[in-house]
Amino acid sequence: MVKLFAKFLKPYRWLLLAVIGLQLVQAMASLLLPSLNASIIDDGVAKQNFAHIWTFGAFMLGVSILQVAGQISVTWCGSRAAMGFGRDLRQAVFDSAINFSRREMGEFGAPSLITRSTNDVQQVQQFVLMSAVVIVSAPLVMIGGVVMALREDPGLSWLIVAAVFALGVVISVLVVQMTPLFKQMQIRIDNLNRVLREQISGLRVIRAFTTEPTEAARFDRANRDYVKTALAVGARMMTMFPTVFLIMNLTQVAVIWFGAGRINQGDLQVGQLTAYLSYLMQILMSVMMASVMLMIGPRAAVTAGRIKEVLETNSSVVPPENPVTELRAHSVVEFSDVEFRYPGAAEPVIRQITFTAKPGTTTAIIGATGAGKTTLVNLIPRLYDVSAGRVLVDGVDVRELDQDLLWAQIGIVPQQPYLFSGTIASNLRMGNPDASDDELWQALDVAQATEFVSKLADGLEAPIAQGGTNVSGGQRQRLAIARALVRKPEIYIFDDSFSALDVATDAQVRAGLAETTKDAAVIVVAQRVSTIRDADQIVVLEEGTICGIGTHEWLLENNPTYAEIVESQFQTEEAPA
């Protein structure tokens, strides 16, 4: 935690040094005011010395103005440092998360990463702000207050010791109780975010299966768990403040009670008692501010630990130390005895995979659900790294390629096409930010999306909601295909990208793609045989291994697994066609 704060607060060290200096001035002003007030009472009011009253009154006014100016400056500098710290830390969490492979994303989960980059960063940022405002002035005022109080009257010092000891015991007990609760609270927030995100994303499924009451109960449970923990924390925090004020008020009563006796005995003056009370209040207020820091501290420590966990987690997809930065004009994709298994899995998902996808050809991958088709193509852009064997692009292992160069070679349409909030044009230009409108329309034409886009009032500037929820599944797939085409890569990967298209539109899209991608290596993952029957080679997967490679006609005659897939999709008399 200390290293985390040291690293991200380093750019703001001058602001923090200014805060320390200003707090020193503010603390000195605070300690000076009670003595000035005592002097006015004892040497001015008691002796009817109006010149003394006016002189010291003006001095008090100047010190008060200096104190207010110091507090404003401390708050401004502290806020600037804390906000900048939060911004940099949030950016660092985002940069770490964006470089995670799918393995790390699965370990943390999207809801937890969202919580860590928002709520957790906010908690740490609040701790920095409170520290900047009180961490210097509180101990200075407390120590200075003790010294000045003893200077006024040592005989009442035992009251200060008793009050500070009582406050210390109360605060220590509460902090010990609250530390595990803060950790539990962050876990509850993660769970609440996860449930809410699932329900919003799966709203159509929930309505389709009329499980609204069940999902409402699930959210209610997660919500109540969080509320229960938050109330437990709140109850302890609410216990602290009344207890602190009770101790403060009882201490004041005791000071007045015992101080009155000392005044009667002539050992203490009225002004000195007033100053002593002021110093006592400053001491106890400093202790209370320190207690607030102790309350915030455990939660900040928990959240800082969660943030540090993200920052210190390295992606399993490691960039090469000496990357290859150049390739030939056209990319050949080659799988050489590839094996992949998920972390902790007893058996590999795919194994002994060997085939080559050459430029100007289409390689189709087909197989039963769970055969490993999507996992296989995810190895090309290094969303995962192979467990054994090699995936080569243009004869170079993808683990040795510069990552930007590798990704620039690939245009991928994922199994679940995702569109970002913005416009149609902004989504298409993710493939190529410099693409002209003509290039966008050309890609839309190949993807058979021109008709529905041109009917929209704003055309290319028509708005797209987050996730593309304001367009149909088929339209979303066609826009995702167009986005890949705008990139004009050397390798196209279509991961079941035609499943939401009707047969006629599927055929039209494939016909358009045949001309546009004629010089590229095209890899198509599909469930429908009609989508891949014209492929140059079809790779048939069965339980993670290749059980056949060939053309549609050859596999139909020589591969029982492929023949079974074809038979399940076509009438027997149509199968050989």
Image (tube, rainbow, N blue to C red):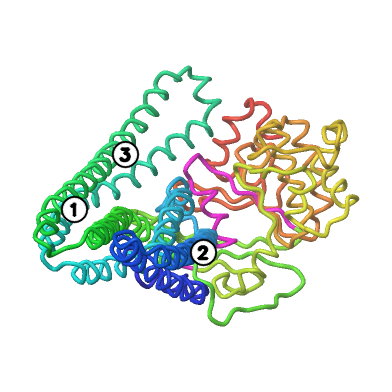
The answer to whether residue 156 is above or below residue 119 is below
Q: Which residue is mark 2?
A: 69
Mark 1 touches mark 2? (CB < 8 Å) = no
Q: Which residue is mark 3?
A: 230
Residue that lies at the very extreme toward the front in this rendered image: 48
Side of 503 relative to 209 (left or right): right
For the residues labelled 1 and 2, the Cα–Cα distance comes to: 37 Å
Q: Which residue is mark 1?
A: 176
Near mark 2 (Cα within 10 A), the count class, few <14, some 14-19 or many ≥20, is some
Secondary structure, mark 1, is helix
Camera-side residue of 188 and 144: 144
Camera-side residue of 403 and 496: 403
Instruction: Tell me the kind of residue under disc 3.
Output: Ala
Q: Which callout, 2 or 3, points at the residue further toward the start of the chain?
A: 2
Q: Which mark's residue is nearer the viewer, 2 or 3? A: 2
Q: Which residues are magenta?
A: 361-389
Side of 120 relative to 552 (left or right): left
Q: Which callout, 1 or 3, points at the residue further toward the start of the chain?
A: 1
Camera-side residue of 454 and 116: 116
